[in-house]
Amino acid sequence: MKKITLDDLAKELNISKGTVDRAIHNRPGVSPRTKEKVLKLVAKYNYKPDKVARVMSLKAKKIKIGVVCQAEPGFFWDHVIAGLRAAQRELADFGLELNCQRTGYKREAHAIIEKIDALVAEGSDALIIVPTDTPKLKEKIAQLKRQGIPVATLNDDLVNSQRLFYVGPQVRKSGRVAGDLMGRFLRGRGRVATITGSVQSFEYRERLRGFHEVLCERYPGIEVVGQHTMDYSQDSNLFEAFKGLDGIYNSDGATLAKVGELIESAASHIVLVGHELSEQVEALLREGIVDAAISQDPFSQGYFIVKLLFNYLAWGVTPPCEQMNTRVDIILKENINLGDQIINPYYIP
Amino acid sequence: MKKITLDDLAKELNISKGTVDRAIHNRPGVSPRTKEKVLKLVAKYNYKPDKVARVMSLKAKKIKIGVVCQAEPGFFWDHVIAGLRAAQRELADFGLELNCQRTGYKREAHAIIEKIDALVAEGSDALIIVPTDTPKLKEKIAQLKRQGIPVATLNDDLVNSQRLFYVGPQVRKSGRVAGDLMGRFLRGRGRVATITGSVQSFEYRERLRGFHEVLCERYPGIEVVGQHTMDYSQDSNLFEAFKGLDGIYNSDGATLAKVGELIESAASHIVLVGHELSEQVEALLREGIVDAAISQDPFSQGYFIVKLLFNYLAWGVTPPCEQMNTRVDIILKENINLGDQIINPYYIP
DNA sequence: CTGAAAGCGCTTACAG
DNA sequence: CTGAAAGCGCTTACAG
């Protein structure tokens, strides 16, 4: 029942540990015959190298992961970064080094590629990026793959690229959840409007699509009477547009607090459903202005993408699937701040 | 910038590594003067022993955690166990051994204590238990603490005991969330009844309390017209009692599927809010019979309590607080099965 | 292509 | 009370 070691295998085959090790890890300089013998025995005993010993003997070698990550809005991305850092702390003793480069709100492909090149030059073994959907970036990812540098996508996927895997939300589903909430809160009837970011984005479009789908399928008594856009960084007055509405769905994750304030100043009783938490949104939830906020669990996005990529690099563990999704959390007045991250022993608030 | 090691400290003080090690870990046989010198230097450099090397040198020593855990209902506890196992797999190479003993639906103190004694006899370094609130068990926990065996409570806390920490849900809050949902789904008016488990339990009582609190505070137009009990293991017919109701709150986590089926057969449009997921409850959510199920994230309960206790035993990391809460997840038709556990690389479905 | 040996940074049994 | 040394299970530079 004792755990089998390299030494055991070497003794049984009457060869040295070094040779066994080389055979197992496909290192050059092992005769095919020897290699075969070794692999047979490995399979027989289901031998797995001891992780701790491996890290121990590789002390000098660091595993470097480079990150190119959006910086704004902070109420969302700060939590992603907190997750990245939590994983970094957890894995520091196992040789992980994380280099995190932040970009602005607009993720221009050229800026991302520039940061990627810098990270590669500095010696990154793998990259985590928040991509934009451009051919240039896809080509870059393919090229990195050829160089042996795997890329994982965070928060936004790049489906037809050579990226290794994706960690992030299911945006369409989160739109469907919004539709579900709106339908229930209005008991199936009323006039609603949608407000979305002015930027053309896959994310915003998919959310709206999910929202409309659910209204069509299950709440025919709800009429969508207006579709507005709004900019994260500019003021906007949709005051007039709110008249006579029963509900508003705010589908981008950046303007919920603004919309809430507009409604508040209009002193109307519109049901407001939107995405992402921030201090302001939490306050508006408490006041009853925002009725529900749907969160995509930013902390977990950062935390798990690092753990998954590290497992891949350090122990050769391939993730269970290509797309791994964070939760779609429904936050109401009564479950703001419940549990969640605080339970993670590496989380530092 | 190089990481400082035991050897560095020893060289700087012109003493041996062994002595430095003994001083740092409060092991016997170090003169006060030497100890002081060492600790001063440790503080100066903020020296932290390398975790990997520590585990490496302690290979022979296992850290044994014993678990006394409820077994039923399986739709809930199976996920707790899955979480325990996930943590076990993650930490196996670091010396964790987990021995999990399961009890039945009713957690009799004497049965729990029996299992505790067996686990201690077998050499457990620490215990995780799902307690019942009896003086005997509290006394047992105090006694274990005196023996140097820390106890963590899972899912159900024992507040005035000597337990080290608690991981589990905030039951009162989850009742409040239920009240919030009921109020919103009924738009603030209607007749509702509550159904709870027939067992006297802190958990059930607190949930009902939270539910009533929110109705009182925020939804005066909702009238509670009936309070029923129901047994997890017995049939029950509340058919008549459902007449004329707009909503039902099912506060125990075990009978939601049953209540749902009763409502289904009555073909009525009662809003049904309850706790915990199971295959049947998921089916009822899809059919629209159950309107919302509130989950307390059983997987995380199992996963994190093991990680936290292991961190305490292996590296001396004390958890950030005494009570660590898992999430209060709101599950509707549209966010069944979204993300969550699958993202954990050690989760095996 | 293969082996013997040193080393990663701790811990501990043994000797003094 | 203190030191010198062996050992945990891998990896790799070096020698053959």
Image (spheres, coloured by chain):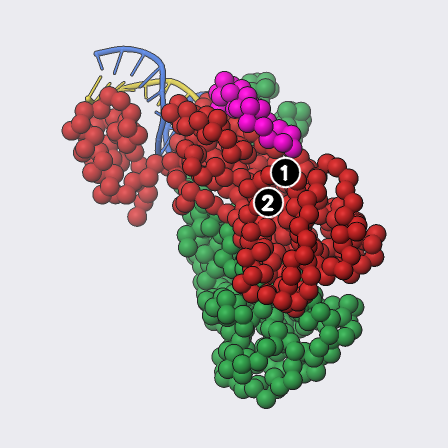
Chain colours: A green, B red, C blue, D yellow
Using the rendered view, name the quadrant where residue A34 is placed. Answer: top right
Screen quadrant of the N terminus of chain A: top right
Residue B95 seen in this snapshot? no
Q: Amino acid at mark 1?
A: Val
- Which of the chains bears the disc numbered 1? B
Q: Disc 1 and disc 2: Cα gap in Å?
A: 9 Å
A85 relative to B256 in the view: left or right = left
Q: With respect to residue A256, does B86 lie above or below?
A: above
Q: Is residue B62 left or right of residue A138?
A: left
**Mark 1, other Cα within 10 Å: few <14 / some 14–19 / many ≥20:** few
Residue at image position (66%, 67%) is: B189
| Letter of the chain that mark 2 sits on in the rendering | B
Q: Is residue B112 magenta?
A: yes
Quarter of the figure with residue B286: bottom right
Q: Mark 1 — residue?
A: B199
Tag shown at residue B188 = none
Identity of the residue furthest to the bottom in this view: A240
| Quadrant (top left, top right, bottom left, bottom right) of the C terminus of chain A | bottom left
B83 vs A203: above or below = above
Horizontal relation, residue B19 to residue A311: left or right: left
> Measured from the top left, where is residue A342 in percent x and y?
46, 50
Counting residues from the start of the chain, the first of labels 1 and 2 encountered is 1
Do the residues under discs 1 and 2 have CB atoms within 8 angstroms? yes
As helix, strand or loop, the secondary structure at mark 2 comes to: helix
Where is residue B256 drawn, in percent x and y? 71, 48
Q: Which residues are magenta?
A: B97-125
Query: Which residue is the site of mark 2?
Result: B204
Q: Is residue B39 magenta?
A: no
For the point 67% across and 24% down, the residue is A44
User: In this orientation, which residue lies closer to the viewer: B321 or A16?
Assistant: B321
Image position, residue A279 (x, y; %): 46, 67
Q: Secondary structure at mark 1?
A: loop
